Image (cartoon, rainbow, N blue to C red):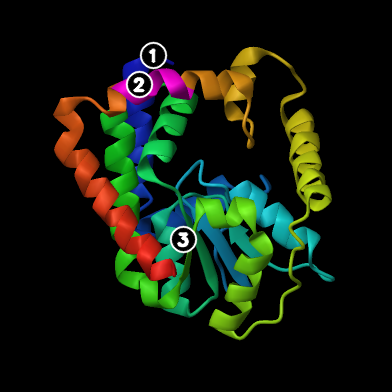
Amino acid sequence: MGAEAARFRYVARYRFSLYPALYLPWARRHYAGTGIEVVGPDTELVIEGFGRSGSTFAVDAFELAQTRPVRIAHHTHAAAQVVAAARRGIPSLVIVRHPDDATVSHMARRGIPAVTALRSWIRYHERVAPWRDRLLLVSFEEVTSDFGAVTRRLNERFGTGYGVFEHTKENEARVFEIIETRNRERFRTEQPERARSLARPTREREALKASFRSELEAARLRSLHARAAELYRSLVSTSG
């Protein structure tokens, strides 16, 4: 796929996924049998975030701490899923990653320019923001450093009694082992180009992200960058 086609598909995806009435019926058909779960009448919990925000770690860590299966809607990376859950009163954990980090990660994975990824980050979070009182917003750093504290806040916020993840080095390693096993089963390859899709940091992707930061910090993106930063501060402040 050419760069322009990839950019068009990316923009279309993140615009289309803002609207529950349009997106959710399509997503239920499109993701059926893939492991990606869409919110529905039997959903107990939603764990979501803009793409590359740590939702894979959050879902696997949460499931590792439970004594029973929990019906979780996750991994659509769609604002529509969050809005639908808020309307239905379903407990929802939404991870907010700093726009700089999320943008360069999307650039590295999708091969898109900074302006495209940054605008999509803004659209997603502006759509979610009006529903913040019905959600638990948490930062990427909270998820990756102490997911146990995040789970306790989830239980306090929604009156649930979910098992709390003990965020030890050993348990963190178990989560990454689960992720790696799933990646091997999904891709069955060690080819470098496939590494861009892995749901954990890789040396290749980190090197790519470092090379993209100068584009993100260009003067022509200054106002857009400031808008994203202010939105991030307001959401993280809400998260407490």
Q: Is residue 49 above or below residue 217?
A: below
Crowding at dot 3, Cα within 10 Å, few <14 / some 14-19 / many 20+, comes out as many
The residue drawn where x is 54% and y is 24% is 206
Q: Answer with left or right where residue 224 lies relative to residue 240.
A: left
In the rendered structure, are the residues bearing label 1 and label 2 in contact, judged by CB atoms less than 8 Å apart? Answer: yes
Quadrant of image for the C terminus: bottom left
* Residue 43 is at least partly visible in this image: no
Earlier sequence position, callout 3 versus callout 2: 2
> Bounds of the magenta span?
209-214
Residue type indicated by callout 3? Gln
Crowding at dot 1, Cα within 10 Å, few <14 / some 14-19 / many 20+, comes out as few
State whether the magenta stretch is mostly helix, strand or loop.
helix
On residue 81, the disc is 3
In the rendered structure, are the residues bearing label 3 and label 1 in contact, judged by CB atoms less than 8 Å apart? Answer: no
Whole-percent x, y for residue 211 in the image = 41, 17
Query: Hey, which quadrant is residue 117 in on the image?
Result: top left
Q: Give the alpha-carbon distance from disc 3 to disc 1, as whole Å.
A: 29 Å
The residue drawn where x is 52% and y is 57% is 48
Whole-percent x, y for residue 223 in the image = 15, 40
Whole-percent x, y for residue 224 in the image = 19, 40
**Callout 2: helix, strand or loop?**
helix
On residue 5, the disc is 2
